[in-house]
């Protein structure tokens, strides 16, 4: 298990291209299960989670080809297995998205209960309840969800909680169902819209994606399609924060600014200067300290929970005191304990963090606990006095394409070292 070493230094400056969105690429890759024709998917990020989904699809019988431009061709003509095993599903919750497509096209599926980051319960009951409403017979036995259906039937489904993967799973199941399905209280995230766009290119009849009510008229079959994955809005926000907290200047390219408006608004409130184009954002940090900004996470289009850790860090070195309220996941403040080790002044009260800014953080060994927390700690190391060792960075490799290389392009002093680095150094 590798580690990262980040050395605090000067401002980050330069231009970078934003990678394709992992959370959009995964469901689009999985929807290849819905057709016997070839899917061509471009702008795929090079991430561990992508590799895991490729391995899972391959085990199900999907034929995959990848070129050097990270374009994937997927063909599910010869799918001969409907079991998604524990050893693949345990590492990422998005694996449950194979449940809907397998059930819709093949009438059966067995999917291990999923794993992933330890940031909250994220129960699968929303997926199960929705598929049962579509006529599936489902049992949970020995850690597996076992589902059967002759052909799914359209239904009106109300999501008790807004769930991105729940909405996506039901969309993919409903496109081949008999009749009309209406998903109420649906997730509105750009990744849901991107999946709907791909499904429509395949021949699905979907209306309302991006609103809280999605209507799907089932069709007999879907065809192949060519689809380009949208840019990663969380990677975009993370690099903008990196430049802002370092006192630097950055231009991010190949981005959709309208998808990160909540983040851009908070950066302006913190004192950063922003220029925005059709597919780029230019940020210049203020001359003095950033201003503390209050944050409250909520489903899209509100402030994203995946940017919460980065703004806790921003507030840690900003002028003033701010509150950060986490409403999406109940266990997503684990990075705060690590930031305190670096000198941050943060008090926790339930789902609220009260952050009083300090002028400087101090380097310390820290441990990543989830994907976005790991990014927060890497950025903290780049602005702290001294050399910060970040452990358990397998989390960051799940969601950020070559993060140390991109940060190095901006002038960061950061390197990857093997897990026995300290032992070798002291020997």
Image: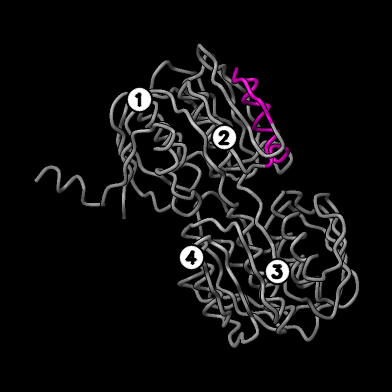
The range drawn in magenta is: 256-276
User: Which residue is located at x 52 percent, y 35 percent?
Assistant: 15
What whole-number distance in Å separates the C-alpha atoms at marks 1 and 4? 34 Å
Q: Which residue is mark 4?
A: 51
User: Which residue is located at x 78 percent, y 86 percent?
Assistant: 150
Q: Which residue is mark 1?
A: 9
> x, y (%) of residue 178?
87, 78
Foreground mark, 3 or 2, reads: 3
Q: Secondary structure at mark 3?
A: helix
What whole-number distance in Å separates the C-alpha atoms at marks 4 and 3? 26 Å
Foreground mark, 1 or 3, reads: 1
Q: Earlier in the sequence, mark 1 or mark 3?
A: 1
Q: Which residue is mark 3?
A: 128
What whole-number distance in Å separates the C-alpha atoms at marks 3 and 2? 30 Å
Q: Alpha-carbon neighbours of circle 1 within 10 Å: few (<14), some, or many (≥20)? A: some
Q: Secondary structure at mark 1?
A: loop
What whole-number distance in Å separates the C-alpha atoms at marks 1 and 3? 50 Å
Foreground mark, 4 or 3, reads: 4
Task: Please state, as top left, top right, bottom left or bottom right, where the N terminus lies in the image.
Answer: bottom left
Q: How is the image coloured?
A: one colour
Q: Alpha-carbon neighbours of circle 3 within 10 Å: few (<14), some, or many (≥20)? A: many
- Taking the magenta stretch, the answer to whether it contains residue 315 is no
- Is 270 or 75 nearer to us in this picture? 75
């Amino acid at each position: 298990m590798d580690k990262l070493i980040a050395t605090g230094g000067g401002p980050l400056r330069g231009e970078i291209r934003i990678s394709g969105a992992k959370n959009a690429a995964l469901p689009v890759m999985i929807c290849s299960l819905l057709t016997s024709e070839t899917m061509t998917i471009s702008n795929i990020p090079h991430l561990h989670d992508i590799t895991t989904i490729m391995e899972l699809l391959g085990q199900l019988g999907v034929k995959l080809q990848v070129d050097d431009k990270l374009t994937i061709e997927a063909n599910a003509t010869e799918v001969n297995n409907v079991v998604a095993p524990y050893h693949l599903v345990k590492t990422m919750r998005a694996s449950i998205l194979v449940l809907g497509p397998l059930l819709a096209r093949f009438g059966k599926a067995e999917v291990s209960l999923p794993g992933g980051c330890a940031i909250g319960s994220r129960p699968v009951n929303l997926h199960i309840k929705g598929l049962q409403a579509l006529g599936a017979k489902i049992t949970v036995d020995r850690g597996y969800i076992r589902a059967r259906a002759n052909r799914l039937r359209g239904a009106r489904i109300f999501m008790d909680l807004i769930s991105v993967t729940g909405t996506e799973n039901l969309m993919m199941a409903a496109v081949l169902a008999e009749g009309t399905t209406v998903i109420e209280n649906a997730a509105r995230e750009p990744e849901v819209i991107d999946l709907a766009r791909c499904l429509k290119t395949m021949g699905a009849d979907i209306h309302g994606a991006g609103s809280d009510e999605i209507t799907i008229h089932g069709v007999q079959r879907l065809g192949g399609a060519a689809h380009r994955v949208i840019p990663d809005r969380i990677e975009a926000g993370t690099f903008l924060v990196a430049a802002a907290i370092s006192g630097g200047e950055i231009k991010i390219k190949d981005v959709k600014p309208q998808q990160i408006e909540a983040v851009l608004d908070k950066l302006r409130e913190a004192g950063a200067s922003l220029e925005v184009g059709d597919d780029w954002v230019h940020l210049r940090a203020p001359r003095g300290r950033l201003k503390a900004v209050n944050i409250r996470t909520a489903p899209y289009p509100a402030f994203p929970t995946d940017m919460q850790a980065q703004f806790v860090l921003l507030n840690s070195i900003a002028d003033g005191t701010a509150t950060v309220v986490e409403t999406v996941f109940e266990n997503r403040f684990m990075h705060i304990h690590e930031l305190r080790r670096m000198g941050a002044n943060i008090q926790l009260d339930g789902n609220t963090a009260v952050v009083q800014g300090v002028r400087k953080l101090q380097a310390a060994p820290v441990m990543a606990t989830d994907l976005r927390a790991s990014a927060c700690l890497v950025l903290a190391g780049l602005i702290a006095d001294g050399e910060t060792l970040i452990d358990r960075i397998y989390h960051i490799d799940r969601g950020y394409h070559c993060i140390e290389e991109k940060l190095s392009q901006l002038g960061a002093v950061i390197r990857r070292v093997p897990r026995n680095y300290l032992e070798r150094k002291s020997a």
